Amino acid sequence: MNIRIGNGYDIHRLVTGRPLILGGIEIPHSSGLLGHSDADVLTHAIMDALLGALSLGDIGHYFPPTDPQWEGANSLVLLQQVHKLILEKGWQINNIDSVIVAEKPKLKPHILTMRDKLSRTLNLEPDRIGIKATTNEGLDATGKEEGIAAYAVALLIQDKSEE
């Protein structure tokens, strides 16, 4: 069996007048993330981890912010396209682990819903997707509530008999 690991990271600025989308769900908050798409940092970090595991570049290569077709895009739709690419290359997702870094809002009440949404999008059992939330204890841009960041790691597997 072949295995590959990839990691991903994303950060977006918090602004008023936009919804806060994380893990494909809207979370009640006074501000949302600024970006060309829905700016879902968790889903973006997961996509970069999946692409990185196979040395396929990053999401900016596939969904450039200069391309008007991706303006306001639902990141779960983009994740489905990345997943399709992974499957076409003969790989499958074993598991994903991730961390969201945000001072506010408190994310613990939303983690299971995010996990379920992502697992349905990727057709994975929910226990194959880990999501944790932490703060930066008031340090840096995330700590000062100027933005939200996410980190993700993905393990991909390929059965050698399918090569």
Image: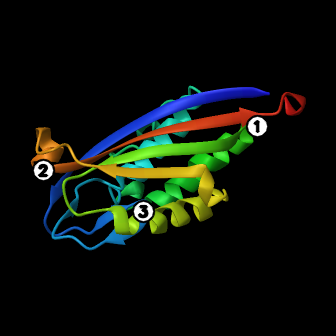
Residue with the mark numbered 2 = 146
Q: Nearer the viewer, residue 76 or 22?
A: 22
Identify the amino acid type marked 3.
Answer: Ile
Q: Above or below — where is 135 with respect to 110?
A: above
Residue 35's tag is none
Query: Residue 70 sits in which quadrant?
Result: bottom left
Q: Is residue 90 left or right of residue 25?
A: right
The percent position of residue 65, horizontal first and vertical second, equals 34, 46
In front of the other: label 1 or label 2? Answer: 2
Residue with the mark numbered 3 = 111
Query: Residue 37 sits in which quadrant?
Result: bottom left
Q: Nearer the viewer, residue 135 or 33?
A: 135
Identify the amino acid type marked 1.
Answer: Gly
Q: Nearer the viewer, residue 163 or 108?
A: 108
Q: Is residue 87 left or right of residue 43?
A: right
Total marks in image? 3
The percent position of residue 48, horizontal first and vertical second, equals 47, 38
Q: Is residue 69 left or right of residue 145?
A: right
Which comes before the other along the chain, label 1 or label 2?
1
Q: CA distance from mark 1 to mark 3?
A: 30 Å
Q: Above or below — where is 128 with respect to 72?
A: above
At label 1, counting other C-alpha atoms closer than 10 Å, the crowd grade (few under 14, some 14-19, many 20 or more) is some
